[in-house]
Structures are given as C-alpha cells and as structure tokens.
C-alpha cells in the first residue's frame, strides 16, 4: 500500500498511533466491548470507530451520560488496558506507514506520536512493533486539556519538537484526528488501516502543504 503525501517540505511528522501506526483498532474494540459488557453498557462498533481519537475519560463520560450509568473511569480504563495487553501478540503495523517512519528517521525529520490513548497503551503497542525508539516524543491522554478534534494534542507535539504548526504533517486515520490537525493549522494525510485499503492524501489547510 502506497500512502501518498500532500506536496511540501515538512519539518516534522506527527503520527496518531491506533489505526495509523498500529493496526490496533479491532483489538481495542474487542477489549472495550468485553469491558463494557461487564458494566451492561452498550457500545457498537460503528460508534467506537466514529469516536476514534477521543480519550478514555471522554468516552466513558459520554457513555455514562448517554446511558444513565456511573462507570468509574479508572476501573474501565484499567480493565480495557488489561484485555488489550492480552491481545498484543496479534498486533501488526498498518501497511505502508513504517516506510514513512523510517524516512523521517533517515532524513532526521523530528517525529512524534500523538494519541488519545494512555501512555501505557501507546508504549506497549510501539514496543511490540519495534518502533518505540523511532519517535522523539509521545503525546498521550492526560498530556493535554482537550481531546481531538481540538488541536491541543498536535500543538503540544509541535511545541515539544520545536517546529511551527504550519511545518508539520499529520498522519491520521480518524475524522476527528483530521479535524484536529486542520484546527492546528497543519497539513494532514488520511491513513486507512489494513482492512481499509490505500491511504489517501486529505489535502492541507489553506496556505499549507505547498513547497517551502
């Protein structure tokens, strides 16, 4: 699978983790479904994918509000993480993305992972894939005040890397992630998971993505 990039000389690459670097979304859904079943909480697969990029705390709060529940965030997060860890031996990288990660390393382009998942989950996934040392920083749930589609996570990553937002290229699989990148003033490329076919460039914010 070839992931086509928008035109431009980008000074930093920012990668979402789940569904972008790691083909982990089916595994996460299995873990979430089993966890929430234990709390008699309905969570469809369509809704799970629609909420891609949201933090655990945000998802649990929304489910509690929608279904009149009082699930404790920490307990739900801990159980879902435990079940996901058990599935990690099945994890693979999203086809085509590793080439861009290695390109960034070879060209000394600073790179970061920007995720709505916990640091523990992101670290575990990247370790299994042998990619943890490819990134200069990890921005995870709890590091920023507002989840995607707010731009906070991407702006924090750019700040940590010392690169202007307009010089960053974001790799994302979710609609919320693309919206967050656009809100941050960053160019982006939509990445499809292993089951979704080839990646498609999503374009860039006005004035971004042109050669510079």
Image (cartoon, rainbow, N blue to C red):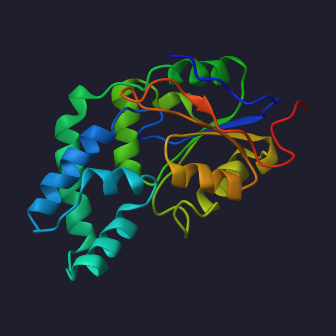
Residue 103 location (% of width, % of height): 65, 19
Residue 99 location (% of width, % of height): 56, 17
Q: Which of the pair 172/80 is nearer the observer?
A: 172
Task: Residue 164: tell me if it is visible.
Answer: no
Q: Name the quarter where the C terminus is drawn.
A: top right
Q: Based on the displayed image, in which of its 4 quarters is residue 110 positioned?
A: top right
Q: Is residue 28 left or right of residue 164?
A: left
Q: Which of the pair 159/16 is nearer the observer?
A: 16
170 vs 68: above or below: above
Q: How many marks?
A: 0
**Residue appearing at x 27%, y 71% in the figure:** 73
Q: Is residue 161 left or right of residue 52?
A: right
Task: Residue 170: tell me if it is visible.
Answer: yes
Q: Based on the displayed image, in which of its 4 quarters is residue 72 positioned?
A: bottom left
Q: Which of the pair 28/120 is nearer the observer?
A: 28
Q: Is residue 70 left or right of residue 116?
A: left
**Residue appearing at x 81%, y 47% in the figure:** 166
**Residue appearing at x 55%, y 64% in the figure:** 144
126 vs 78: above or below: above
41 vs 48: above or below: below
Q: Which of the pair 27/66 is nearer the observer?
A: 66
Residue 141 location (% of width, % of height): 45, 59
**Residue appearing at x 53%, y 33% in the figure:** 191
């Amino acid at each position: 699978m070839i992931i086509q990039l928008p035109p431009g000389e980008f000074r930093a690459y920012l990668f979402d983790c789940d569904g972008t670097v790691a083909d982990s979304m089916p595994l996460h859904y299995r873990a979430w479904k089993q966890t929430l079943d234990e709390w008699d909480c309905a969570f469809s697969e369509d809704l799970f994918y629609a909420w891609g990029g949201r933090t655990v705390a945000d998802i649990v709060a929304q489910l509690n509000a929608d279904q009149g529940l009082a699930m404790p965030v920490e307990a739900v997060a801990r159980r879902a993480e435990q079940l996901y860890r058990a599935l990690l031996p099945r994890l693979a990288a999203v086809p085509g993305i590793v080439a861009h990660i290695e390109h960034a390393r070879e060209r000394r382009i600073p790179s970061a992972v920007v995720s709505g998942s916990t640091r523990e989950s992101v670290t575990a996934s990247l370790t299994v894939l042998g990619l943890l040392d490819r990134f200069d920083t990890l921005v995870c749930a709890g590091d920023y005040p507002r989840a995607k589609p707010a731009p906070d996570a991407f702006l924090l990553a750019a700040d940590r890397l010392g690169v202007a937002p307009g010089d960053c290229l974001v790799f994302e699989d979710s609609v919320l992630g693309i919206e967050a990148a656009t809100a941050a003033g960053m160019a982006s490329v939509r990445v499809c998971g292993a089951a979704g076919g080839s990646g498609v460039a999503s374009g860039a914010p006005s004035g971004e993505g042109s050669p510079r």
